[in-house]
Image: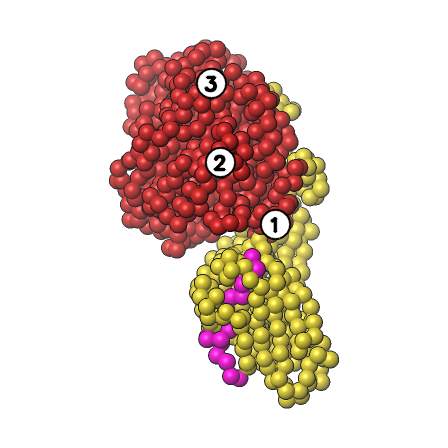
Amino acid sequence: MEPVARRRALGLAAAAAPALAAAPAAFGAAPAEAAAGGAPRPARRLRTAAEIGRIRLTWEGEAYAPLVDHYAIHASRTRGFTPGPGNLIAKTVYASFSHSGMGGRRQDWHYRLVTVDAAGNRSRPSAETAGHSAESVTASGRPLATVGAFDHKSLELALAPAGYAQYKTRFAGGVDYTHGESDPSADWSYIQPGPADAWNDRKATRATFRFPLDAVPAGETWLAIWLIDTHASNPGSVVLALNGAPVREVELENGATRGSLEGDATVPGSALVPSYVELRLPASALKTGENVLTIDKRTGSWHAYDALGVFAR
Amino acid sequence: MTPSLPAPRRRSFLTLTGVGAAAFAVGTGHSDAAENAGGAVPSDPFTLGVASGDPRPDGFVLWTRLAPRPLDPDGHGGMPRRPCTVRYEVAEDAAFTKVVRRGQALATPELAHSVHPEVTGLRPGREYFYRFRAGTEVSPAGRTRTAPDPRSRPASLRLATASCAAWYHAHFTAFEHLAKEDLDLVVFLGDYVYEYGITSKNMLRGGVPLPGPEHAVETVTLEQWRLRYSLFKTDPNLQAAHAAAPWIVTSDDHEVQNNHADAWSETGIPPSDFLRRRAVAYRAFYENLPVRRAVLPHGPDITLYNRLRWGRLAQIDMLDNRQYRDGFPAGVVEDDSPERHDPRRSILGARQERWLYDGLSRSDAVWNLMGTGVVMAEIDRDTGPGHLYSNDMWDGFPANRDRLWAALKRHRVANPVALSGDIHHHVAAELKSDWKDPGSPAIGTELVCTSIGSDGDGADTDKYADLWLGNPHVKFYNGRRGYVSCTLTPSELTSEFKTVPYVSRPGAPVTTAARFVTEAGRPGLNREV
């Protein structure tokens, strides 16, 4: 696809036309914004979407005329705030941002954006928009069985934070973990490789989580899998089954390919990209006594765990 | 510091530039109504050095960027947010007693106070010297040269190829030695900067403090890209290499993001967002390199492919193998998937392919060099009976390579030579007419330069040596840092693979790890050292 058609297809404004289109050739190197001058326009239609552990922001704004250096994202827990250095949470050139690391409890935030162009000119702040994160079952539910702590760290799990090369020998037959008997630091690998991983001989893998139930819960039973990171370009999917009955295949989000080497996403500036899988388990598949949850990785590369658990809600 | 630049008189400006007073333009070096824009200039604004590029028979482009505090986190280098006039002069001698051109350019905050004046009207095939002045501050002088007359048959061309200059992985000792060679041209083949955050985990440049937290994150915004270029360009050896000879440049992936293909990002950034990133990355690329105004990006698009002639001795086609390429054939970097062989796949894009084949068809040069960021030769990466290829290189686009081979044969192109980088190893290879038949004739030669700094000290041989040398058309492998120094004459191309034994600390000597001679009319590699 030619560039202009591609930009239209992506919904982007046309790039700044070369200035020579409207001026003598000798003026040809002046970017459009140089002639336009003044402050850029603020971002428009700032929207928020609630997700577990994060609030996803999207907005509309010029990309190329003037060329946007970045959007400065200001956030506050208080309505009617004034943007300033103390509430600047991020800068991005994209028209979206994920305000993450909020944990399982719902959090409420207010946002305003300032557009900064290539010349350093700053727009007036955008209109303020409110948003909140979604409550995780790890906060609202009652834990029935868990592995690890839901804390955006993999450090308490086996081989963490960077021992992936030992998976092949330590977990040759996959992970097989029994709640109440197994030890997270020895028996649940922080990383589960996939068939794209040469370091595990490109094998599909299975993680098995065995947990007892005195009785099948009367209400809903939920599974929560928190990941500290996945492979950036090929995270693959996980196929979930409970007591042999298929539950769902879940496509994993792209991560940053850092969770195989680092285990703490709470470190300031961490490149890790946590993601969350939470879904209701079918009551018909649950049973009194030992239940067996299997997590099969048949496509893509590895994912790295933060924690896993089954909750009553 | 060079002597003070005398204040040029207005009449001399108009005489020397040959353009009217109304025709001065922002950042280009042409005249402008505001001859003294900007008021006072902060002291010591030339911290990023000077450069020249794209030599033509009648001139070249000059470059500098005003940055009195180059590491200010906002990327503006400590400059006030207003335009500033920068004057330049070009002389035939290092003492500037024979000044042949003077001009001025307007440095604006939109372009991070960079200027790219294009100088014309000079004599072909000649050495020149240049310097800038902003306010009362005078830059160091640079040496450059014009290309020979296009009808001439120069006796030689001395060039060096370089790539992959990860500042945080190395002292730029390789650039230090490159700058001391008597070169006509430097061919830079991509990865001038890297996007990765610089932290204690990847900081291998010994004896240097870890840069601040603003450097510890991946570069996404324009201010981050500008800061990244500033950090790298504060290196005195890189500055010396720029000041020693004109450069021609192309980009590879790290000028935007590892492994990117057009608007596709390996980290799943949606194309609409990734193009915004590409736009600021390319803007910073333009602002920091000696390239002409035709290279100024339009939004996310930049025209990098470029043709240079060195008389009738050499034609150099600099290729852009990132911006127009198709994505990974089956979504993975390495495989031998059927999709890899899709005849529609292109690493150059249809327009650039047509431009390349058309240019090759018209070439009357003895040597036809193609500068491409990634390796062109087929490299089977499975050392056993299977087959595995890197789809990030030309191996991901065999149909495009076949079309190029067909064009070389159809137009009887003389002495094709691929100049590439990317892999952080020196490799010399023959370009075979049939990759599956080691006995088939070579149709050209590939000289892959190792990194200037990426991957630290390295070693003469390493775990990748068997992989590369397992391909019979690969004649040489070395895993040290360095560059390739070439001398082209009408009868032969001599390539010297230069290495340094360490880069984690400064001061390493340079060694010629291998020397090959390629005879005109006989593609291939004859090893001398």
Q: Along the line of sight, which residue is nearer the eye, B250 or B357?
A: B357
Q: What colour scheme governs how the chains and residues are painted in the rendered image of this protein? A: by chain
Closer to viewer: mark 1 or mark 2: 2
**Position of residue B333 measured from the top left corner of the image (x, y, whole percent):** 55, 48
As drawn, the residue found furthest toward the right would be A284
- The part of the chain drawn in magenta is A180-196
For residue A302, side relative to residue B53 (left or right): right
Which secondary structure dominates the residues rendered in magenta?
loop
Mark 3, residues whose alpha carbon is within 10 Å: few (<14), some, or many (≥20)?
Answer: many
User: Which residue, given by chain and number where applicable, does mark 2 sit on?
Assistant: B438
Identify the residue at image location x=49%, y=29%: B442
Q: Earlier in the sequence, mark 1 or mark 2?
A: 1
For residue B11, side relative to residue A251 (left or right): left
User: Which residue, given by chain and number where applicable, does mark 1 sit on?
Assistant: B331
Mark 2, residues whose alpha carbon is within 10 Å: few (<14), some, or many (≥20)?
Answer: few
Identify the residue at image location x=49%, y=75%: A187
Callout 1: residue from which chain? Answer: B
For residue B409, side relative to residue B177 (left or right): right
Closer to viewer: mark 3 or mark 2: 2
Can residue B155 be seen at all in this image of the molecule?
yes
**Position of residue A226 measured from the top left corner of the image (x, y, whole percent):** 57, 68
Say which quarter of the image contains residue A32.
top right
Chain letter, yellow: A
Residue A185 part of the magenta segment: yes
Amino acid on which the number 1 mark rests in the picture: Gly
Q: Earlier in the sequence, mark 1 or mark 3?
A: 1
The image shows residue B77, relative to residue B408, as above or below, that is below
Residue A265 part of the magenta segment: no
